[in-house]
Image: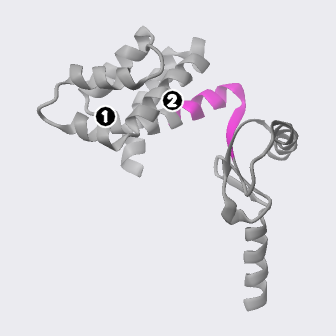
Amino acid sequence: MAELATIARPYAEALFQVSRADLAATQSWLDSLAGAAGNDELLQFAANPKVNASQVFHIVTSVLQGPLPERGANFLRAVIDNHRLAALPEVARQFRQLANSVSGSADALIQSAFPISPAELDSLKTTLEKRFGRRLEPSVQVDPDLIGGVRVVVGDEVLDTSVKARLEQMKMALTA
């Protein structure tokens, strides 16, 4: 959704500029806010004209696991006051991209047909870092539809070594 990305960009960039000294901590509380803001019921509550900003702030902060730092609380108030709560997941994504650009790392979504053990993940991470040429922050999703193998998404690059992808390639070759 291009509009949401456009709305989120100034928030992510401004937060990035004031948080350069502590990007990891900021990313942590921002991810918590984004998770809360991803709840449809919360967004409907916030959109209700009978609900004021302080009520929305109280509800959002009450579902978080820990207290927000002062900067986080001020940021959340600004987002709520400007009716941009729905943009928080996109703000968090763009903030992560900015933080990764500074650290020279990237997020990697690893989709596997089966659960991956920590030892296997470490080995796979090392191999993928050599392949993509940068430090990776992996997150794993289990997708049984892949049948076997893995599918890795790093930014706009995709490495698909799954059985499902190989079967699709064979199907295309046979029908061509």
The residue positioned 40% from the left and 31% from the top of the image is 10
Q: Is residue 53 left or right of residue 19?
A: left
Residue 20 can be seen in this image: yes
Query: Is disc 2 placed on a helix, strand or loop?
Result: helix
- Where 97 sits versus 111, above or below? above
Is 1 or 89 nearer to us in this picture?
89
Report, in whole angstroms, how far the alpha carbon at label 2 lies from the one at label 1.
15 Å
Residue for badge 2: 31
Q: Position of residue 67 (x, y in %)?
A: 44, 13
**Total numbered badges shown on the rendered structure:** 2
Name the quadrant containing residue 99. top right
Query: Is disc 1 placed on a helix, strand or loop?
Result: loop
Please say whether residue 98 is one of the residues in the magenta stretch. yes
- Where 93 sits versus 149, above or below? above
Residue 176 can be seen in this image: no
Q: Is residue 34 left or right of residue 85?
A: right
Q: Where is the C terminus found, in terms of image quarters?
A: bottom right
- Where 103 sits versus 110, above or below? above
Which comes before the other along the chain, label 2 or label 1?
2
Main SS, magenta region, reads helix
The residue positioned 21% from the left and 38% from the top of the image is 47
Q: Position of residue 88 (x, y in %)?
A: 41, 34
Name the quadrant containing residue 148. bottom right
The residue positioned 47% from the left and 21% from the top of the image is 65
Residue lying furthest left: 50
Residue for badge 1: 84
Please say whether residue 38 is one of the residues in the magenta stretch. no
Residue type highlighted by circle 2? Asp
Give the extent of the magenta segment: 94-109
